Image (cartoon, grey):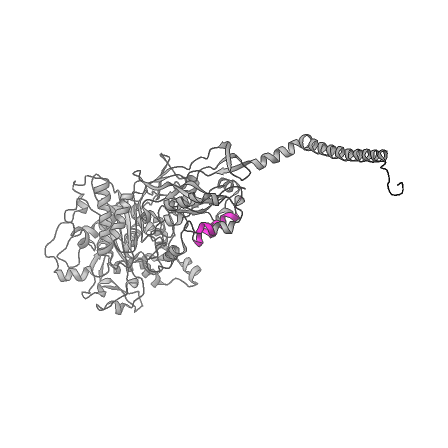
Amino acid sequence: MTGRWQFRDHEAERRLFNRRVMLASSIIFLLLATLVAKLVNLQVVQYEYFSARSDGNRLHVQYVPPNRGLIYDRSGTLLADNLPVYNLTIVPEEVIDLDATLEYLSGLVDLSAGDIETFEEQLRRSRVPYSSVPLRYVLTEEEKYRVAVNNHRMPGVSMEPQLMRHYPFDSLTAHSVGYVSHINQQELDALDETEFENYGGTTHIGKTGVERTYEHLLHGQVGYETVEKNNRGRVMRVLESTEALAGNDISLHLDHRLQMVAEEALGDYRGAVVAIEPETGGILAMVSKPGFDPNLFVTGISRKDYGALVTDEVNTPLFDRSTNPYPPGSTIKPFLGLAGLHLGLVDYDYTIDDPGYFRLPGVSYRWNDYTMRTVIGGGHGVTDLRKAIYQSCDTFFYDLGNRLGIDAIYDFMSLFGFGGNLALDIDYARSGVLPSRDWKMETRGEPWYPGDTINSSIGQGYMWATPLQLATAASLIANEGRMVRPRILQSVNGEPYFLEEEFPTADVVLEDPDYWRYIGDAMTMVVHRPYSNVFRDYGTAFEAIARADPDMTYKIAGKTGTAQVVGISQNIRSSAEIRVSELNRDHALFIAFAPAGHPQIEPRIALAVFVENGEHGSTVAGPVAKKITDAWLLDILQLDLTVEAEPETVFPQEPAPPTPSEIAAVAAVNE
C-alpha cells in the first residue's frame, strides 16, 4: 500500500500557496503604485499641460469673415448686392475617404472640374483645423434636398448659408463696377502681414473695376470666435466671439439710368461711352459694349463659359473699350485749334484757301482732305479756324500742325490729359499715346519726321487716346479750363469722399480766356450750323442731329471724328466702288458737352462716344451722343431749357440748301 499511494503534504502546499499569494500581492501592489504614481503625475504634476491640451482639442478659434460693403449708384440703386445662398462645404478632418466622398457627392450635385480644382486649391491653403472648405457655391433647391436626405452618409459634409456677391444689372456694369472672385495664391502673397490676417476665412476679393479699386473700403474687418467641438469636430457651442465689421457701403457718381440709355443707344455696335459731370468730375456713365455677366465669375466660371468669352475675337467682351486707346481722329481738332490760338499761330481772322490737300515744302506727296476722296472733290475754299472745326477741314489742321511742330503739340495736348490718366480712381485706365520725338526714338528707334506731325495733327498716325481721355478733355473745354479730375466714387457710408491726389493738378490757363468761348461756338456749329448757300458750309453733324430733331430745346457743342483702322492708298480711297470688310472699317467718334451757350445753365454733361468700325462719327456716333444728352438733361435732370441761347450760338437758316443727292454724298464720307 505504501508503495502505490503517497499521502499529500498539506503543510507544504500551504506554504507554497502563501508564497504565491505574497508574490501576486506584491505585483498587484507595484502595479497599483505605478498607476497611482502615473495618475498623480497626470493629475497633479502635469495638470496644467494636459489641461491646456485638452482644451486645445476641444476649443477652436475660427475666423468670421465680414460682409462685403454694398455699391450704389448716385440715385441709391444697388449695383452690387449680397444675396443669401447655401454653399456645399467639407470639413476635411471629419472625412474618412475624401476621394470617395467627392465621388458620392458628384451624384447628388453638379460638380464641375473647375469646382474640384478650386476646392483643392483652397484645401492646400486652409490654415485653421476643422474649418469648412467650400466645394460648390449656390446650391439649387433640388440639390439642397438631395444633400439633406443623404447627409447622414457623409460625415464632414454640410450646407452652410453665406452672403454671396450679386450684380443685378449683369453686363451693364461689368466693366465699370467690376466683379469679385476667388482669391488666388498670387493675390494672397501680395498681402502684407496685417492684410493677410484680415483675409482669414475670406474666399473672395475684388478683381476688376470699382470692386478692385476700393477693395480696402468694401472688404471690412475679419472677426473671430472661440467654439467648443465634440470628438467628431462638430461645433457644440460658441464660447467667445469678436464680431466682424462689415465693409463700407459706397455710392458712385454713376447713374444706372444713363448707363442703360448709353448701352441701348449703341445698339448692335461694339463701342464705348464715357459721360462726365463737368462741375464735379463725377463719371455719370461708363459703358463698354459688348459686356459679360460678372455673376459667372463670383461663383467660379466654368471652363466652357470662360472659353466662350476669351475666344470671341470679334466682340472681345472682356476687353474694356472705355479705358483702352484708339486713334482719336478729328476729335482732337478743337484742342489743336486752342493750341494755335494760345501760341499765336492763328487768330479769329486767319484763313487758308483749301484746295483739298496739303503738301510739305519740297515734298510731292499730298495729304488729302476728305473732300478729295468723294465724287464732289474741290476742298473747303476759304477757311478760318471756326469753319475748320465745324467742317472738319483736314487741310487747315495739316497746315496748323506743321507750323506748331510736334514739341508744341505734345506740351499743349498733355495739359488736357492726353498721354496720361487724369482720373483719380480709375488707375487701370491706359494712358494712350501722345507721340513725341523722345517717344518715337525710345519705342521705334527712329527719328521724328515732319510727315509724322502731319498725321498726328488729325488724330492719326501714332496718336492714340481712350474714350475716358476724350471725355475728360471735352469736360475741360466745358469748364473753360477749370480742372476737375474725373472720379467714380461719390461717398462712403453717406459721407462725401475726397481723394488727396486731386489737389496738385492745375487749371488750363490760356493767353486769352475768350478762346474758350470761340472754340465752344465752333463746336456748337458742328451740330447746329444749318445749310448755307455755299455748298458744304454746314456742320458735319447737323444733318444727323439738329436737322433730325428740329424741336431741340438746347444746343450741343460737339466734334465728329473718324479714325482709320487700316492703311488704304489715297488713290483707292477716292474710288466710290471700294468695299471694306466690317472689321477694317473706320472707327466713329464724337465728343460733346451740353447744354452749350445757354445763358443760365452751365454745361451739365461732357461725353465721348466711340463706335468700333462705325465708319462715320457724324451719322453714327453723333446720334448716340444726342440720345444720351437728351436722357440726362431732359429726362433725368428735367432741366428747363426753353430759354433762348446766347446770340453767339444762334445760326440763322440760310436759303438755297444743296440737293438731296449732294447731301447724301457728303453725309456718306468722313468728316
So how many labels did they put on this image? Answer: 0
State which region is magenta.
103-131
Identify the image quadrant of the C terminus. Answer: bottom left
Relative to 505, residue 654 above or below: below
Q: Is residue 637 above or below residue 614?
A: above
Q: Is residue 218 left or right of residue 669?
A: right
- Residue 13 in the figure: left or right of residue 559: right
The image quadrant where one finds the N terminus is top right
Q: Nearer the viewer, residue 386 or 85?
A: 85
Task: Answer whether residue 511 is visible to the viewer in this image.
Answer: no
Farthest residue to the right: give it: 2
The x and y percentages for residue 380 are 20, 60
The image quadrant of residue 367 is: bottom left
Q: Is residue 647 magenta?
A: no
Q: Residue furthest left?
A: 655
Is 130 contained in the magenta span? yes
Q: Residue 43's spot in the image, x, y percent? A: 67, 31
User: Could you tell me residue 13's position as x and y percent?
Assistant: 83, 35
**Does residue 572 appear left or right of residue 83 in this picture?**
left
| 641 with respect to 107 (left or right) | left
Vertical comparison of 474 with 18: above or below = below
Which residue is situated farthest in the front direction here? 1
Q: Nearer the viewer, residue 487 or 108?
A: 108
Whether residue 299 can be seen here: yes
Residue situated in front as seen by the camera: 470 or 638: 638
